[in-house]
Image: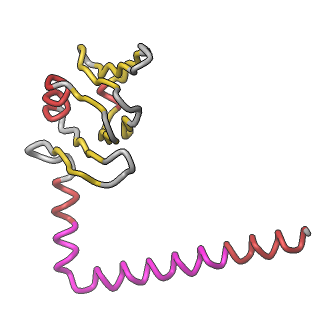
């Protein structure tokens, strides 16, 4: 499933059957199947109708609101989030004293590996010149 980004200003999002209908100011329409949407990000002046919002919440789809410039404004979450099991595991891992150490070791190892890859690529490009 994918995140639906709504960032064309003054567009209107409606709900019809199993689709979100995005109407743009220039009269274009795009149909987005709800089954493919896992999250909606609304940026700027975009209107979501009440039936569209109700359907998103019923399906457990979060809506995140941003300003036109991408600043976080707020989030509309369904009563039961899809990631409740993930959160529970995160809390459980937080209480395990060995888990943070393993995570930190993984972060450092990944960072060093990525730095090595970047240096090798950079060295190759210098040799090509």
Instruction: Tell me which residue sits at (17%, 27%) in the image.
Output: 55
- The image quadrant of residue 33 is top left
* Viewport quadrant of the C terminus: bottom right
Overall secondary structure of the magenta section: helix
Name the residue rendered at 51%, 81% in the picture: 109
Magenta highlight on residue 32: no
Residue range corresponding to the magenta coloring: 90-117
Q: Is residue 98 above or below residue 75?
A: below
Q: How is the image coloured?
A: secondary structure
Give me the residue at 15% from left, 35% from top: 57
Q: Number of callouts in the render?
A: 0
* Rendered view: 46 above or below 118: above
Q: Residue 13 location, x and y as percent?
A: 28, 24
Whether the magenta-drawn stretch holds residue 105 is answered as yes
Q: What residue do we see at 20% from left, 81% from top?
A: 96
Left or right: 88 as drawn, with respect to 111: left
Seen from this angle, which residue lies furthest left?
79
Q: Nearer the viewer, residue 94 or 63?
A: 63
Q: On the picture, is 84 further left or further right than 23?
A: left
- Residue 91, position in %: x, y? 17, 70
- The quarter of the image holding the N terminus is top left
Furthest residue in direction right, as rendered:
129
Decide: is 112 above or below 67: below
Instruction: Give x and y (percent) for residue 85.
Output: 18, 55
Task: For residue 23, say whether it is visible.
Answer: yes
């Amino acid at each position: 499933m994918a995140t639906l980004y709504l960032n064309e200003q003054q567009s209107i999002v409606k709900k019809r059957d199993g689709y979100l209908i995005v109407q743009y100011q220039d009269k274009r329409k795009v149909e987005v199947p709800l089954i493919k949407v896992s999250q909606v990000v609304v940026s700027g002046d975009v209107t979501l109708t009440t039936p569209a919002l109700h359907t998103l919440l019923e399906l457990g789809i979060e809506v995140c609101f941003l300003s036109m410039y991408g600043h976080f404004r707020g989030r509309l979450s369904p009563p039961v989030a899809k990631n409740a099991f993930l959160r529970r595991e995160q809390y459980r891992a937080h209480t395990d004293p060995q888990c943070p150490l393993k995570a930190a070791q993984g972060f450092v190892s990944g960072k060093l590996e990525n730095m090595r890859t970047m240096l090798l690529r950079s060295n190759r490009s210098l040799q090509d010149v």
